[in-house]
């Protein structure tokens, strides 16, 4: 409707509409509030071996090709190796330079490699940059009715890896005292490890979050974007994000799905996940400072370069501030038990 000029500014206009709508609705019905619970369990000390797994998939030559995921792996890997005493590493990329290709079978084998032989005091690190998806939940453990997925290089023939399987292969049964830190830079990534406890920037556990206003704002902004750029695929995706938020509105800490997740996905190990966005959101494949990169991976490195020992929750806050006003995604922090994450970041 608005030609090339409309296409050029559709994203910015859509973001402004979404923000303004959310602010207006909050003044009318107070939406977006959350009840909290204090986290009290203490992180174990790291004194053993350190292993790291890096996964970057650009899907070169395939539909939905990305640009920044392999750069993310190179940047995150270089930063972590420079600042932390990591022993063993394994890298899966689709540029021919990794140890293996990031196929479905290789990803699951890499998860098993990362946790093999883990003992109390060991630190395990995983960074994933690539596509993430969502599919209908079949076992009743998702508050929004959708499972989140990782999308391997050979997804067209081998399929996605559903969060239930990610948890079963990578997380379940890790011994007490092991620390697993996951950095998940992909769409729909908040609960892609199926961890039951989410955090706010004050370090408290978020128990109930009302997504009604956010869902309405997302649906309205998707319509405005469509008017400007006519992109049917994007408007459908954005509409579904808004619809999922509406579906999960009002489902709080006492929901059957949440209780099932706590009962079946809580961990003895110290499992912590930084994710690029909420389950209802997408993560940006961006161009920042002249380089293709994932917005979340960039924000993590930028924040830690300022202070490698900042608290986990301060790191979350810094990442959000780095992206605020530029991207609609909201980085998230979750854990497998009620860990006090007001302690310094360490891997």
Image (tube, rainbow, N blue to C red):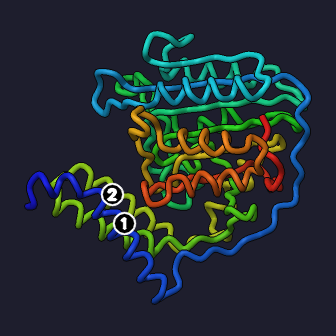
On screen, residue 41 versus residue 192, left or right, reads: right
| Left/right of residue 242 with respect to residue 207 in the rendered view | left
Image quarter of the C terminus: top right
Q: Distance between the residues labelled 1 and 2?
A: 7 Å
| Residue at image location 57% in from the left, 10% down from the top | 99
Image point 52% across, 80% down: which residue?
Answer: 31
**Residue indicated by mark 1:** 218
User: In the image, residue 302 lies at what x, y percent?
Assistant: 59, 42
* Residue for point 77% across, 69% down: 37
Where is residue 42? Give x, y as percent: 89, 51
Q: Element type at marker 1?
A: helix
Is 36 situated above or below 237? below
Marks 1 & 2, CB-CB < 8 Å contact: yes
Q: How crowded is mark 1: few (under 14 residues within 10 Å), some or many (20 or more)?
A: many
92 up-or-down from 196: above or below: above
Residue toward you, 338 or 137? 338
**Residue identifier under label 2:** 238
Above or below — where is 34 with respect to 294?
below
- The outermost residue toward the bottom is 28
């Amino acid at each position: 409707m608005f030609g090339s000029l409309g296409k050029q500014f559709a994203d910015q206009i859509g973001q402004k509409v979404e923000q303004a709508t959310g602010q207006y609705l909050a003044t009318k019905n107070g939406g977006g509030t959350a009840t909290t619970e204090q986290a009290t369990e203490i992180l174990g000390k790291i004194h053993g071996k350190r292993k790291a797994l890096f996964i970057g998939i650009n899907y070169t030559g395939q539909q939905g090709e990305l640009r920044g995921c392999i750069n993310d792996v190179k940047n995150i890997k270089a930063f972590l190796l420079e600042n932390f005493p990591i022993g063993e590493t394994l890298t899966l990329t689709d540029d021919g330079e990794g140890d293996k290709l990031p196929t479905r079978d290789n990803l699951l084998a890499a998860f098993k490699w990362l946790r093999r032989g883990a003992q109390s005091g060991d630190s395990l690190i995983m960074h994933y940059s690539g596509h993430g998806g969502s599919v209908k939940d079949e076992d009743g453990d998702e508050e929004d009715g959708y499972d989140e997925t990782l999308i391997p290089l050979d997804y067209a023939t081998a399929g996605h890896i559903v969060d239930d399987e990610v948890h079963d292969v990578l997380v379940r049964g890790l011994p007490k005292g092991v620390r697993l830190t996951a950095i998940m830079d992909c769409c729909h990534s908040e609960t892609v490890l199926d961890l039951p406890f989410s955090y706010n920037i004050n370090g408290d556990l978020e128990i109930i979050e009302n997504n009604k206003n956010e869902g309405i704002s997302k649906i309205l902004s998707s319509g405005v974007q469509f008017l400007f750029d006519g992109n049917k695929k994007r408007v459908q995706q954005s509409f579904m994000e808004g619809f999922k938020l509406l579906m999960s509105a009002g489902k709080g800490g006492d929901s059957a799905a949440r209780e099932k997740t706590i009962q079946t996905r809580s961990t003895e190990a110290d499992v912590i996940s930084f994710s690029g966005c909420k389950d209802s959101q997408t993560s940006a494949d961006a161009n920042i400072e002249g380089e293709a990169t994932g917005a979340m991976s960039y924000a993590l490195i930028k924040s830690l370069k300022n202070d490698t020992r900042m608290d986990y929750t301060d790191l979350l806050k810094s990442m959000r501030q780095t992206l605020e006003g530029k991207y609609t995604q909201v980085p998230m922090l979750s854990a497998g038990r009620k860990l006090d994450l007001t302690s310094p970041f360490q891997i």
